[in-house]
């Protein structure tokens, strides 16, 4: 572990302005202060929508590059920056933190955590960002540690072990701060872990509560696992949750059960895998859950970001909803006060189920041997952030269309610290070169359909498609929408673009030479709007020409 201090808030040479503490009140009302970007998804509602409107449909063509930050890591750049009073806090894979000047991108300080050699995240040595509260930053690491850093100097305040990386536990998500706690979840579902979400004291790192995503003996939901399969059932957490301060509920998407593709080794619904769980952030108590894909055959992690939106649906409506485009290919509308299923409809080609019943449970139509299942293993969408615009009243998702895989289940024995996949895949899988061999077979290359990418605009009340922006390549980038009636996103070809959020018309684009792997953000610097995105191994920051 090493720390490199380049300059600090006290430096007269650069005389940077020290920011005030980020309070819980500021986090609660982050949407009312769009000059900063205070959480992974911008606000607790996770809409990735900003009320900034200096850049709009009329002048977006005048965007110019202001500066570029070049990462030293060649791992995928999946982090979303935080911005506090023109200071940008950014993680570089696997676990290095930077404080940057929003004016030029110069580094104020850098902190590097060197992960243990036991760290073994299944799908890349990545990190998706930080949380901030008071004068502290919080980072989760790929060797399952949680760190607190001084936001002004980069000095390590405390470090704790959350889980054992030798058993496959890792953390790749950005933490979420709620009140006096920082909340994280563990990845590692492909190693036969038992997933959990845990909360830690902001000041000391002391664990305050832990919620296991697989219920133990005597707990509600334990009966949904057969015999001892629950002990190594996965159900990991690798994306950041959302929070409703009024309801005092925090919402988290839960990953697939293990072994991934052999449900016969784990009969039952396998709660709370492939679910959204609503927890009391003070106690960790489960208030409600909704399961999208019971006894998941296809690795359809439900780790997508829970997007919270308020609108009127009918006279009996609570007005408080959760919008969810699931990896399984269905869009869901849930009442976030109680988890009630309200609406569900496919947003991409689906053949593993013919539809959803009145409770939202899938009506499954399994495909036979050597038959292509839609969507494929990477899903109709995946971990990249969607967006909801209260201005257009549309929900936007990065989708993989007409994409399928062949699933080949196999028996597998659990071995601590080894992949616990239970199957193999047939067909050319997008990104397959980065995936491990599961079970006893590597991924092979016969008979499948690769499909194409698209940005979809959905009516959140019905799930119907309003417009579609097709892409030649799959999109790995999340989505940002703004009050300037703009949508920003990117794709694997390195195209960063702006669309008219109402119509899907492309208005501006830049080719940046590297794959987009995170969601764009926007903020103010010197009262001027900036747009930032990570493409390839660099962070690009844009503003209007003067």
Image: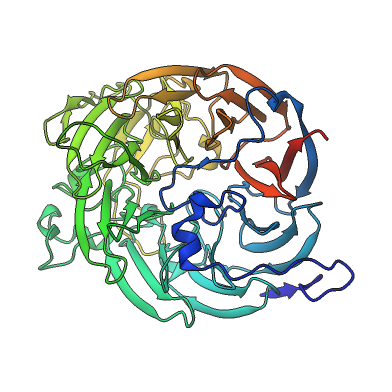
- The percent position of residue 545, horizontal first and vertical second, equals 81, 33
Between 35 and 534, the one nearer to me in the picture? 35
Relative to residue 92, is residue 199 drawn left or right? left
Between 49 and 431, the one nearer to me in the picture? 49
Q: Quick check: can you spot residue 8?
A: yes
Relative to residue 220, is residue 347 drawn left or right? right
Q: Note whether 546 is above or below 108 in the view shown.
A: above
Quadrant of the rendering where the N terminus is positioned: bottom right
Q: Note whether 145 is above or below 51 in the view shown.
A: below
Relative to residue 313, is residue 529 drawn left or right? right
Q: Note whether 81 is above or below 110 in the view shown.
A: above
Q: Quadrant of residue 407?
A: top left
Residue shown at the point (42%, 63%) measured from the top left: 169
- The percent position of residue 4, horizontal first and vertical second, equals 76, 72
- The percent position of residue 220, horizontal first and vertical second, equals 11, 61
Q: Quick check: can you spot residue 296?
A: no
Quadrant of the rendering where the C terminus is positioned: top right
Q: Quadrant of residue 376?
A: top left
- The percent position of residue 210, horizontal first and vertical second, equals 31, 71
Q: Note whether 485 is above or below 480 in the view shown.
A: above
Residue shown at the point (29%, 61%) measured from the top left: 248
| Number of numbered labels in the structure image | 0
């Amino acid at each position: 572990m090493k720390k490199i201090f380049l300059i600090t808030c006290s430096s007269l040479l650069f005389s940077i302005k020290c920011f005030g503490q980020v309070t819980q009140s500021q986090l609660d009302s982050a949407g009312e202060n769009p000059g900063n970007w205070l959480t992974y998804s911008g606000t607790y509602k996770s809409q990735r929508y900003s009320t900034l409107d200096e850049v709009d449909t009329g002048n977006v063509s005048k965007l110019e590059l202001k500066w570029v930050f070049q990462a030293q890591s060649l791992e995928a750049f999946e982090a979303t920056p935080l911005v506090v009073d023109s200071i940008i806090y950014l993680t570089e894979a696997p676990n290095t933190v930077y404080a940057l000047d929003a004016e030029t991108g110069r580094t104020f300080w850098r902190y590097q955590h060197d992960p243990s050699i036991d760290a073994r995240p299944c799908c890349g040595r990545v990190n998706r960002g930080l949380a901030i509260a008071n004068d502290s930053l919080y980072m989760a690491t790929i060797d399952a540690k949680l760190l607190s850093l001084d936001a002004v100097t980069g000095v390590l305040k405390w470090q704790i072990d959350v889980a054992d990386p030798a058993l496959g536990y890792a953390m790749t998500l950005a933490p979420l701060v709620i009140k006096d706690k920082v909340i994280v979840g563990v990845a590692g579902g492909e190693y036969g872990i038992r997933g959990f979400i845990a909360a830690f004291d902001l000041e000391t790192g002391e664990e305050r509560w832990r919620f296991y995503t697989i219920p133990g003996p005597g707990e509600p939901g334990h009966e949904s696992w057969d015999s001892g399969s629950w002990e190594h059932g996965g159900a990991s957490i690798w994306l950041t949750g959302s929070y409703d301060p009024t309801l005092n509920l925090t919402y988290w998407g839960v990953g697939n059960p293990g072994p991934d593709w052999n449900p016969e080794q784990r009969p039952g619904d396998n709660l709370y895998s492939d679910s959204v769980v609503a927890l009391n952030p003070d106690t960790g108590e489960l208030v409600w859950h909704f399961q999208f894909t019971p006894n998941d055959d296809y690795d359809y992690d439900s780790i997508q970001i829970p997007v919270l939106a308020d609108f009127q649906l009918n006279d009996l409506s609570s007005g408080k909803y959760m919008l969810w485009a699931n990896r399984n290919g269905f869009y869901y509308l849930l009442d976030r006060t109680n988890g009630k299923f309200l609406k569900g409809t496919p947003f991409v080609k689906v053949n593993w189920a013919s539809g959803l019943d009145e409770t939202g449970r899938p009506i499954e139509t399994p495909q036979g041997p050597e038959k292509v299942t839609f969507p494929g293993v990477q899903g109709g969408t995946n971990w990249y952030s969607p967006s909801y615009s209260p201005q257009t009243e549309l929900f936007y998702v990065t989708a993989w269309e007409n994409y399928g895989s062949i699933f080949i289940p196999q028996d597998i024995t659990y071995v601590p610290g080894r992949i616990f996949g239970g199957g193999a895949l047939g067909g050319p899988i997008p990104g397959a070169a980065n995936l491990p061999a599961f079970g006893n077979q590597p991924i092979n290359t016969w008979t499948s359909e690769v499909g194409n990418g698209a940005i979809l605009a959905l009516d959140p009340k019905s799930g119907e498609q309003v417009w579609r922006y097709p892409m030649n390549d799959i999109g790995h980038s999340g989505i940002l929408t703004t009050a300037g009636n703009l949508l920003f996103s990117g794709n694997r070809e390195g195209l960063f673009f702006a669309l008219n959020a109402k119509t899907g018309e492309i208005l501006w684009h830049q080719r940046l030479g590297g794959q987009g792997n995170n969601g764009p953000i926007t903020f103010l610097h010197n009262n001027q709007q900036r747009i930032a995105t990570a493409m390839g191994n660099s962070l690009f920051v844009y503003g209007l020409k003067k």
